[in-house]
Amino acid sequence: MKFIADLHIHSKYARAVSPLMTLPELDRWADDKGILVMGTGDFTHPAWAADIKSQLEPAEPGLFKLKAQHKLKTIKNTFAQTRFLLSSEISLVYTRDGRGRRVHVLVYLPDIKSAEALSARLDKIGNIKSDGRPIIGLDTRELMKIVLDINPQAMVIPAHAWTPWFGILGSKSGFNSFEECFGDYTKYIHALETGLSSDPVMNWRVSALDRFALISNSDSHSLQRIGREANLFDTELSYNGIFNALKHNDPKEFLATIEYFPEEGMYHFDGHRDCGISYNPAETRKHRGICSSCGKPVTVGVLNRLEKLADRTEAELDVHEVKLGEVTGKGMKGRVPFVNLVTLDSIIGEALDIGNKSKGVKREYDAMINMFGSELDLLMNIPFADIKAQIAPQIAEAVRRMRERELSITPGYDGTYGVVKIFNPNEKKKIKNSQTSLFS
């Protein structure tokens, strides 16, 4: 069965997360996005765990669905109703061999009993009540032992592997390899999350990562952002179906990932947000890693860090174009292909020259979902002729340009998102000042 899964989000109980991130809203928005399987996020938080127990019920083995009385949207097809998989992100901050270490990991479990057992163990070590993503002073190897002792079917996956502060391979993590971090438990790690600021091609440059499945998830803190990165599977709809697809990393079961353009991520380049300084790796070397404004070391981003650990150039990779629905992605022999997308609200906002959180964008977004079924289906699979025939010409043109990669991106750095531009300034002025379509 083909389906899309977003396996890393946060609940309303996590810091800097929208209070609307509730199970009923996630159920409704997942359907609008075109996502069948959602990670619950934050199952270690007592209040969120209570919501999970009271609002969800068992579906397929290891998966759950929202109880009928909590639904905000009626979906007649039983097999199209959102499934939830128990997930949580844990922040591990500790000292090993006299050095500070910091890593975020994703933990997945197939049943509530196991999730409760893990929460009880972590509650004795750190504070699991103050944040949906708890900060625990525990070595990654000790966490692996605890998790696998509770349930050998658990999945543990390093989160946003390249981000500076808490990615396992990030510039501030304290590690340069999985073996340094997980030791003998590395054999139980079958996947890594690439994060918003890197894509699979970048990761293919590191031969040490060849053995891992490369997954992509939204790490969303708001409803609008779920599905901005996701995974396409063709396997049994169950916890084990997903787990085995990742364990075997078989492109016949793990079909593709949906990606941001990596430049759009918050840590693609190096720099200092407070100083407004952004450097590509060559510029960082030229400045010897020092901010030209304040004289302090810059935050080393994903591209720079990856170049330090890579043992292949992109030119050495046999990367080729792959058709994924109506969109052209990238692939390599024996690897899971991927496609880069821009979210639909951003496309609409750019086309109408208004903020993507505005009421006008939401109105257009809802109308398009009613017409085409889901955001990801529209962006990836609906023939352009059908889109062009039914929506505003400038929005249709923006979708076409996104599909054809006719856009420019100012890369993100030091916690600042990159800026995607589909239209140039002169075109945007015409859009703003004209009641008729720029492209009619």
Image (cartoon, helix red, strand yellow):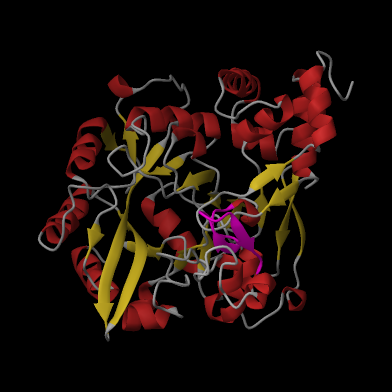
Return the x and y of residue 349 as percentages of the image width and height. 66, 29
Q: Taking 287 as reference, is 242 left or right?
A: left
Return the x and y of residue 182 as percentages of the image width and height. 34, 78
The answer to whether residue 80 of the structure is visible from this angle is no
Tell me what residue is drawn at x 43 percent, y 49 percent: 7
Question: Is residue 389 one of those drawn in magenta?
Answer: no
Q: Residue furthest top?
A: 435
**Compared to 32, does 103 lie above or below?**
below
Tell me what residue is drawn at x 72 percent, y 73 percent: 314
Q: Residue furthest bottom?
A: 97
**Compared to 428, does 137 lie above or below?**
below
State the extent of the magenta-drawn residues as a range: 265-280
Return the x and y of residue 125 as percentages of the image width and height. 13, 63
Which image quadrant for residue 174? bottom left
Judged by its main secondary structure, the magenta piece is loop
Question: Is residue 273 one of those drawn in magenta?
Answer: yes
The answer to whether residue 127 of the structure is visible from this angle is yes
Q: Taking 300 as reference, is 200 left or right?
A: right
